[in-house]
Amino acid sequence: METKNRKVRMGMVGGGEGSFIGAIHRIAAAIDGQIELVCGAFSSNPELSVSSGRQLYLDPARCYPSYQIMFETEALLPPEQRMDFVAIVTPNHLHFPLAQLALQSGFHVLSDKPATLNLKEAIKLKRVIEQTGKLYGLTHTYTGYPLIKQARHLVAKEELGKIRKVVVEYSQGWLASKHDEESKQASWRLDASQSGMSCCMGDIGVHAANLAEYVSGLKIEALCSDLNTVVEGRHLDDDGTVLLKFDSGAKGVLLASQISAGEENNLRLRIYGEKAMLDWSQMEPNSLWLKTNHAPAQLIRTGVGEFCASALQAIRTPAGHPEGYLEAFANIYVNFAKQIIALEHGQESSNRLFDVPGIEEAIRGMAFIENVVAANGSQSKWHSFSVN
Amino acid sequence: METKNRKVRMGMVGGGEGSFIGAIHRIAAAIDGQIELVCGAFSSNPELSVSSGRQLYLDPARCYPSYQIMFETEALLPPEQRMDFVAIVTPNHLHFPLAQLALQSGFHVLSDKPATLNLKEAIKLKRVIEQTGKLYGLTHTYTGYPLIKQARHLVAKEELGKIRKVVVEYSQGWLASKHDEESKQASWRLDASQSGMSCCMGDIGVHAANLAEYVSGLKIEALCSDLNTVVEGRHLDDDGTVLLKFDSGAKGVLLASQISAGEENNLRLRIYGEKAMLDWSQMEPNSLWLKTNHAPAQLIRTGVGEFCASALQAIRTPAGHPEGYLEAFANIYVNFAKQIIALEHGQESSNRLFDVPGIEEAIRGMAFIENVVAANGSQSKWHSFSVN
Amino acid sequence: METKNRKVRMGMVGGGEGSFIGAIHRIAAAIDGQIELVCGAFSSNPELSVSSGRQLYLDPARCYPSYQIMFETEALLPPEQRMDFVAIVTPNHLHFPLAQLALQSGFHVLSDKPATLNLKEAIKLKRVIEQTGKLYGLTHTYTGYPLIKQARHLVAKEELGKIRKVVVEYSQGWLASKHDEESKQASWRLDASQSGMSCCMGDIGVHAANLAEYVSGLKIEALCSDLNTVVEGRHLDDDGTVLLKFDSGAKGVLLASQISAGEENNLRLRIYGEKAMLDWSQMEPNSLWLKTNHAPAQLIRTGVGEFCASALQAIRTPAGHPEGYLEAFANIYVNFAKQIIALEHGQESSNRLFDVPGIEEAIRGMAFIENVVAANGSQSKWHSFSVN
Amino acid sequence: METKNRKVRMGMVGGGEGSFIGAIHRIAAAIDGQIELVCGAFSSNPELSVSSGRQLYLDPARCYPSYQIMFETEALLPPEQRMDFVAIVTPNHLHFPLAQLALQSGFHVLSDKPATLNLKEAIKLKRVIEQTGKLYGLTHTYTGYPLIKQARHLVAKEELGKIRKVVVEYSQGWLASKHDEESKQASWRLDASQSGMSCCMGDIGVHAANLAEYVSGLKIEALCSDLNTVVEGRHLDDDGTVLLKFDSGAKGVLLASQISAGEENNLRLRIYGEKAMLDWSQMEPNSLWLKTNHAPAQLIRTGVGEFCASALQAIRTPAGHPEGYLEAFANIYVNFAKQIIALEHGQESSNRLFDVPGIEEAIRGMAFIENVVAANGSQSKWHSFSVN
């Protein structure tokens, strides 16, 4: 399969000001220059929807007051302008009606997870997908990591032997106190009408289950579940442990928590086989341990050694450059852009906040190189650093 | 300073097919949706230059055969179309002539480092900048990390007390063998006519020196330098150590190497003060250690706790989500875009290589949530997992 | 309580040649010079028992052929010679009869765990202890670590707030294959008549449970248990997960495994409270994490900062010197002792195997110091290293 | 070489109350039960010398008021009682006269480092050793670690290829402030008359140099040295960096510091060869990295996989049990001994400070095992924990 030379056009529903995940989706879509955000209905508040779109530099005509209007209007545009797919980044209860309407309006759908409010809707959605023939994708993000793809590959290649046990954990602390419920992110997740029948399992447990099945290639067949509502006054679970039986007979344990104060976003997967184990942690995603009983442990690092095609394709930076390197680079770019705009408006073009290394750093850098080379050629120990 | 609502337009020189750093710059520019790549001269080979631009979905009219033509042509466009700035991502020897011409043609410049081939050019460049009044930026990427900005802030706030010692190291192994010289990246760096008077110090030592000065706020005043050409047959240094004296009287050590087989991109900065030390490593950029003698060590993690404005502005993801999270997300987006294009061309729309979680994962996810909740409500230990 | 100035005398039952844990107990008893091994019945084989004692440099008269004879004989010795206590390091099924007889013979007992073959015996043992008035100790080793004592202290001081969740894991891989069963250590542990009703839970799960209760100060009140016999042909569990309810209402998860190929001795305890969490791993026992949601994580390191009396007393080395430092030191001592004995027997007194730094290293060391000082005083960069 | 069955007898000079290193030496000597401390002159103060010996449970007749008397008296004892060797643990200036007298009095010597006050004395000492034919050892402790021996082995086997660069660092913070000078340890090290011509290089730099030569098999041939006296008012160096040339042409860097506030005992050695590198840190001594450019990094862990004879002999615990495990065990033993003595004196036999797990933990442990097994056999989810 070879892709042809055009950008894919994206519309977005949800993700207006104050949204966390909307901005994440937009960055993700922008990174490779392959997808262009062309329109959106960013809020259920029509005014906010439109103003959010403008802040994103969209054509004002395509900043829609509602998703219904967006789907209708876009459907009437010529195919070479019309959006190709809709990114759905709303609270959970809107995922299904939105996906259904988008698909039926002729658009592919890329939806945030969980897919729907309940299983019944998900099954119904499958029928809509089949009827419309459109594509449907779900952002189980963690399967997008290069080393997760490599881990799946190693399991499939039977590097671990028969799998015996899967331990997957997803611990967070961000809902540890009553006080934490006040954020927009928290309030809808703890409200069953928007979030569904589960908070912790619906929000993060489902990621952990997906990751375990994705990498192991096994399917959960039975489970023993202990859910807890730890913080008083909540109606949904904020913590839980699930014992798992997989279809192969392997056992598993899934721990999930949103009340584990002190945990950031601790998603970790371990898979134990007859011969070896794999251990991966999302907070250090470029390290994958492969360990056996009778040899040194191997630390597989993104970009060092050989990788399956699927992992290779998911890597953008060379070994030793974590993805943050791209964002560090981006910080220089975006600050430079801000300096340009500031200059245009006659404002102070550079300050500590929008710092970009400039000509002074350029000169010191060249002086460093020249002085180091000169000092190296000298028999004397110390050489004065000169910039001239 | 508040930025007004328009995208900034970028042109690029260099970075055509086979280039590593060009793609990195484009991703960095794209991430925030603030900058649009509008034109480029991507290669000294006119045909390759144009074809590279087309692959990046640029307007064919703005895929230029040479940077001279690009600067001339763009300068004649109306201001609201014309590129705002040029990103220079060529080998070193072109940095100066390119920057000079771009500035004199009325464009801001964001240049890869080192700024020029030698100090003389850098000083000359400063004059050109002053004369033209245009902005000039240099991509000393590592200063773009949030925790580097926070580290600078902590030093400036005197959390470390008076600085006594700075140890900065930048060790790589990618030029450890003759064989490694065959890549495009390696060959020009080892050629003094394109790279300048130093390979190791010019390529990475200068980053380390910049980082040390940036965070410490100190300036190098004298140095003792020992450069090595370890792999036979090379004409430039591929390794070296530099002892440093700073203007405050503090001492320092700078280690740089490109022949340290087994090292990925090991850039690490430690700053020791009277009261405390800071320790940061690029390969785990979201961790910054602050240690003292008589209390538990503090691990500052991006997004956990309080940060200076400059660091805050450089953070895009919540605590515990390394930047790779964005790229994992992007992998799902880009694979989904590829599926759309494939479908358009009647190809198999999904395969293991372009995998995107889809409706099957959606259904299993919803089933997981429902089964977990049902199992939790049961007195029996095990509950069969049903999907229906 | 102040201890008076005499050594305490220890006898040992079990721990003859080929035993792992016997040697560990003897080292532990010897370290502080407070306890002297004076006698033993090291094997159920009388000859082996005696010869093992001789190899440990014991008085031949006190190398007993059986524990019964040992208890009888020692009881008749004058109080100032008689052993004070018995260390029991046999397989599990002998723990109870041995402890009972020792106590009734007038000796204190320090027993390996688990205490007995079953609960009934443990309850009976309590009565014997009460009747005899002798001391009884159980080597739940992991509670002996300084930072475990500090962790308990921090919990008791309510640094974590009310405890919500305890996750304790003890994963090993040493019984991952049939082949691994051939060792002496493995065979009795997998034999219910010697080991009791459980292999994995009896051998290591019980350590994990003890540690969780010790540090948290909570008691297990109910549990949900899933034990597995993973390797075919075994009669006892070699893996398992237990969900826990504590008396305070807190929940817990206990994972234990002996078939997790690739795991060494991965005992880890995490305790989550309303305000903070603690995280400790046996494989890096001098690091204890204290983490909260809104401040940098604190890494408590043995010997850095303030500690409770109980932790302080358990520390033998200064900060930064892991306990292995003592054994590294001991390796030099024991090699030197071997050189002495070899010399006595006219053998080659030093070789690579029994290496001890000697006069050549002494001279080079002094030369290093002198040359470094001389070179520092010189204006020239390089100084030849001279030894004369 | 096989050692015969007798304990080796040790006398000690120095190491009385308040000494740090004396206690370390005694523990090291005691661990394996191969060496017996039989006599000592623990202080230059005769009364303190004798009382220190008594506290160590020595025969009062062999607690000597001075080392001169000790050497004379011991020399007259029958060979089977007489001490075999003297451990010298005094400040540096006494090392030479003591070693000389001990050797000439017929005793082997195991000396703390640095060997003497200066090079001249070390050369003189060599002659004394040759004349007397006695053994002489120097406690360069860090060469006693199992993985250091394995690292030396890997270098000798040419697993790294030809060595190109050695980076060794030894950073501490304990002398970071004036205030830190008040301890007994600090005051003599900063006094040239007791310590020699260097503080930092003499105390720890010499360890780093020894370790670099030991593992690499190379010899320092030339150096460039930059020593610093960072804290005001000191007469000796408390920090320094040394550039190294080895006899093979390889280069090196040695960093040492006692003023790096926040560092514990950070001794780290990296050796870079043509093919691979080794990386070892004293603060995690059971981990040794072996890294190459084009394969996963290997983490060699003590006891996992194959080791050279010299490393194997230096290992006392199984994989995953750091040496601290022995000391944790020892803490239980020593607390139990204290309980015995307390009981003997009618004191409260157990308290939180001298805690040893006892019969209550025994009963709970057995109850845990029984309840877990019973719960596993049940179809119900939860099982009440009963102790009866």
Image (cartoon, coloured by chain):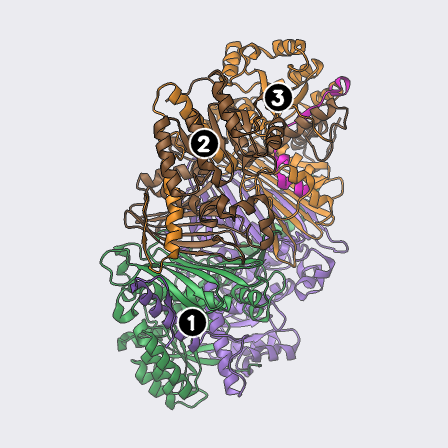
Chain colours: A brown, B orange, C green, D purple
Q: Which mark is residue C139?
A: 1
Q: Amino acid at mark 1?
A: Thr
| Contact between labelled residues 2 and 1, with CB atoms less than 8 Å apart | no
> Residue C23's spot in the image, x, y percent?
39, 68
Q: Mark 1 vs mark 2: tell me if same chain.
A: no
Q: Nearer the viewer, mark 3 or mark 1?
A: 3
Q: Which mark is residue D249?
A: none
Q: Quadrant of residue B282?
A: top right
Q: Main secondary structure of the magenta part?
A: helix
Could you give the CA–CA distance between mark 3 and mark 2, rounded to whole angstroms? 33 Å
Q: Nearer the viewer, mark 3 or mark 2?
A: 2
The residue indicated by pointer 2 is A110
Q: Is residue A318 visible?
A: no
The magenta stretch spans residue B132: yes
Q: Secondary structure at mark 2?
A: strand
The residue indicated by pointer 3 is B87
